[in-house]
């Protein structure tokens, strides 16, 4: 059966997973708000339908509102009609076209004396003009850009008014009365306006007519005229025509040519000035809203009036979610706004839809509406960027459908509300998430720090050799929680282990004291027995008993030595000495003791290896290593000791041929009571020799390592000591 090591997950990681689970809350809120979008759109459609029904109710039975006389876009007139385009702003009379905006694209060019024709004699570069009419609130504005090779202005010394470049306006009211207005200038700037007689030579009153204002500005190719005319002069029931008169000779001041906007220069058949239905606009002005558009159509689906407009939703404010928010939420929301714009679908700020100056609305849904049914529809904008909600209701008069009311509104308000709700909900959720995450992370950090501190203190309480060096913990000992209980339990356990360790440490001295007397008695008895019975000196049983007594004494000596060595080392004074000289001297003496084994020292004779330590304990270490090599090495192979310096370390290599150390014991060979059994061993092996070596090496801040190397295999023990340097003192 194959076992798998379980994955290690820290407490911090587990708490982090718990924190991430909190993200389910804003995720659920996000999906809830998305679902609410459909309900909001449905509610918006219901409101639009109610608005359309209310407007249609106001318009029921008003036949005149849909008659030709009320004026609708061009197609209700003929080819001579003048169309006044709706303007979006007040026009400043400065002779410039900048404030006319997109309306200037509707300007028409007039180039010949014969209206609506262009003969071979016409020269547009000498005399022609562009003309456009527009209306804003109570005024109609006229703009003329005249190309004239010779500009002749009025001479104030002359009484007649038909002897200079000028613009004439003929207006016929609903009763058929004609009025003639002359616009003339003595110099660039403000023009004079007069009410004229039929001949256009003299003013009727002799005084300027101040209700009409006009400005003339010279240009490189001629001049421009910008005029403002009150709506009471030209209204939806009026007919009007303009004439631009050209005089080229400043001496004789004769009229060279005229260009008129009417096909009849006599003014008998002037064009109608076409405006949106004024009565409808007056009725709908109270319903004008910047967020919705209201269209009025007749039975031919022609546009009668348009009010209102679309809002982008970019400036929508939600007081409940914005104005009353805490400052921290507002600040954090502004900080996260760029990220929200990347994640959330913001409504389009600008989009294009059916222009308000449209003459027809050919939507298929109007077929049902003009048949007497109400309809609600969703459609994309012209550019496809926005969703338009549309509600249509028929307008009745005498049991017949006279037209239709259309109320349109973009879904931007709903999308903006949805986006603001999502942003605020996300802001609140993130703040709560960050707060909870911070609290949980601080709690996890505090908890893991307490656990890590208690773990480190617990590990230090027991030495690598298994000796209890601290009988109680100081971490969490006074805290009244589960970790405090655990700390107190570990302290009690360490206290009991410390007592038991002290008992075990005192055991060798007690055994030595208790066993020495019996062993001495046995040893003296064997000697006396040998003296009394000399004939048993050759008895193998006597020799076996003597060897046993000797081994018992050796065991007691080794136990006592190992247990007392650590205390002796701590109290030893350190000195600086040459390790190379010490090893040479020691090996020379040891060769006399081990005459049956060869010991080889590999070292540079000039090498000096100063270290700081205890020469006696270093000699004791060498004794243990040489004894170990002699005991477990091959009798026919030399014991090799090699010394060298590697950077800041003194390295001693003890190499002997023999059986390799088992792999499972290589990491534990220097621990106490670890020994390799050897048949026919002459001495007792308690596994304390290499343990003593490790104690001495550690006390000298060195390292010791055993490994199997070479072929044939041999054992190498590497001991390293730091080289003494005066710079480290």
Image (spheres, helix red, strand yellow):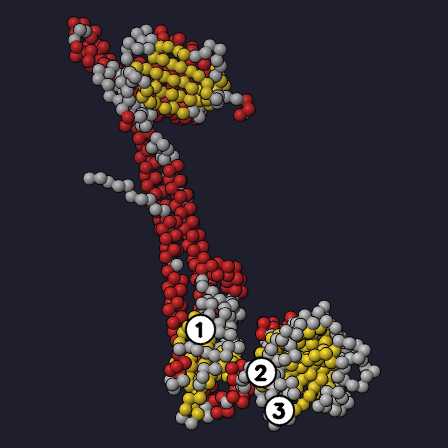
**Residue 173: which numbered mark, if any?**
3
Element at label 1:
strand
Image quadrant assignment for residue 453: top left
Disc 1: which residue: 388
Q: In the rendering, at what x and y percent does residue 149 appear?
A: 72, 71
N-term-proximal mark, 2 vs 3: 2
- SS at circle 2: loop
Residue positioned 44% across, 65% down in the render? 422
Q: CA distance from mark 2 to mark 3?
A: 17 Å
Q: Is residue 346 above or below residue 73?
A: above
The reply to whether residue 367 is in sight is: yes
Where in the figure is residue 260, as x and y percent of width and height? Answer: 65, 81
Q: What's the CA distance linking mark 1 and mark 3?
A: 41 Å
Which mark identifies residue 80? 2
Q: Residues at badges 1 and 2 in contact (C-beta under 8 Å)?
A: no
Circles 2 and 3: CB distance less than 8 Å?
no
**Screen quadrant of the C terminus:** top right
Residue occupying image coordinates x 50% and y 77%: 358
Considering the image in quadrants, where does the N terminus appear?
top left
Q: Residues within 10 Å of mark 2 (few under 14, many from 20)?
A: some
């Amino acid at each position: 059966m194959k076992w798998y090591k379980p994955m290690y997950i820290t407490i911090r990681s587990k708490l982090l997973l718990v924190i991430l689970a909190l993200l389910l809350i804003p995720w659920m809120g996000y999906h809830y708000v998305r679902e609410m979008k459909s309900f909001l759109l449905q509610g918006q459609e219901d409101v639009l339908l109610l608005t359309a029904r209310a407007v249609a109710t106001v318009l029921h039975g008003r036949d005149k509102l849909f008659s030709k006389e009320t004026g609708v876009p061009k197609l209700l007139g003929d080819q001579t009609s003048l169309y006044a385009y709706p303007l979006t702003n007040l026009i400043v009379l400065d002779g410039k076209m900048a404030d006319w905006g997109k309306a200037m694209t509707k300007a028409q060019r007039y180039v010949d004396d014969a209206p609506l024709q262009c003969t071979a004699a016409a020269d547009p570069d000498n005399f022609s003009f562009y003309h456009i009419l527009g209306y804003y609130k109570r005024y109609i504005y006229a703009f003329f850009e005249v190309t004239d090779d010779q500009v002749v202005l009025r001479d104030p010394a002359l009484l007649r008014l038909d002897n200079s470049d000028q613009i004439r306006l003929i207006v016929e009211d609903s009763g058929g009365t004609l009025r003639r207005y002359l616009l003339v200038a003595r110099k660039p700037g403000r023009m004079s306006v007069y009410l004229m007689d039929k001949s256009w030579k003299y003013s009727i009153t002799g005084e300027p007519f101040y209700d009409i204002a006009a400005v003339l500005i010279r240009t490189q190719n001629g001049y421009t005229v910008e005029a403002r005319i009150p709506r009471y002069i030209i209204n939806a029931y009026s007919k009007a025509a303009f004439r631009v008169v050209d005089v080229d000779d400043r001496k004789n001041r004769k009229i060279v040519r005229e260009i008129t906007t009417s096909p009849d220069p006599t003014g008998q058949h002037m064009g109608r000035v076409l405006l949106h239905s004024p009565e409808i606009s007056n009725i709908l002005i109270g319903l004008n809203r910047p967020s919705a558009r209201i269209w009025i159509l007749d039975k031919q689906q022609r546009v009668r009036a348009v009010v209102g407009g679309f809002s982008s939703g970019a400036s929508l404010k939600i007081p409940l979610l914005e104005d009353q928010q805490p400052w921290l939420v507002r600040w954090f929301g502004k900080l996260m706004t760029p990220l929200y714009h990347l994640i959330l679908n913001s409504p389009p700020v600008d989009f294009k839809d059916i222009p308000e100056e449209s003459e027809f609305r050919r939507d298929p849904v109007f077929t049902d509406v003009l048949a007497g049914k109400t309809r609600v529809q969703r459609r994309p904008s012209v550019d496809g960027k926005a969703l338009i909600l549309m509600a249509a209701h028929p307008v009745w008069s005498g049991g017949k459908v006279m037209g239709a009311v259309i109320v349109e509104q973009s879904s931007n308000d709903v999308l903006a509300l949805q986006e603001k709700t999502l942003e605020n909900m996300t802001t609140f959720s993130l703040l709560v998430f960050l707060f909870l995450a911070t609290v949980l992370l601080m709690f996890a950090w505090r908890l893991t720090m307490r656990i890590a501190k208690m773990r480190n203190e617990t590990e230090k309480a027991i030495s690598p050799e298994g000796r209890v060096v601290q009988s109680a913990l100081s971490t969490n000992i006074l805290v009244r929680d589960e970790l405090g209980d655990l700390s107190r339990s570990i302290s009690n356990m360490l206290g009991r282990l410390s007592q038991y360790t002290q008992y075990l440490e005192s055991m060798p001295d007690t055994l030595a004291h208790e066993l020495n007397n019996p062993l001495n008695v046995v040893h003296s008895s064997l000697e006396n027995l040998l003296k009394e019975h000399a004939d048993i000196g050759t008895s193998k049983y006597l020799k076996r008993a003597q060897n046993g007594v000797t081994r018992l004494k050796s065991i007691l000596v080794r136990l006592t030595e190992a247990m007392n060595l650590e205390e002796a080392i701590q109290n030893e004074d350190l000195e600086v000495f040459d390790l190379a000289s010490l090893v040479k001297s020691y090996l020379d003496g040891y060769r006399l003791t081990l005459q049956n084994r060869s010991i080889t020292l590999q070292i540079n004779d000039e090498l000096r290896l100063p270290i700081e330590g205890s020469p006696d304990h270093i000699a004791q270490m060498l004794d243990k290593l040489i004894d170990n090599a002699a005991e477990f090495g091959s009798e026919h192979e030399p014991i090799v000791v090699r010394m060298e310096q590697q950077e800041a370390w003194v390295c001693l290599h003890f190499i002997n041929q023999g059986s390799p150390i088992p792999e499972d014991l290589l990491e534990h060979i220097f621990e106490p009571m670890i020994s390799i059994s050897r048949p026919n061993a002459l001495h007792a092996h308690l596994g304390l020799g290499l343990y003593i070596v490790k104690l001495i090496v550690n006390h000298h801040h060195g390292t010791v390592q055993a490994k199997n190397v070479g072929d044939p295999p041999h054992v190498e023990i590497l001991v390293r000591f730091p080289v003494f340097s005066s710079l480290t003192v």
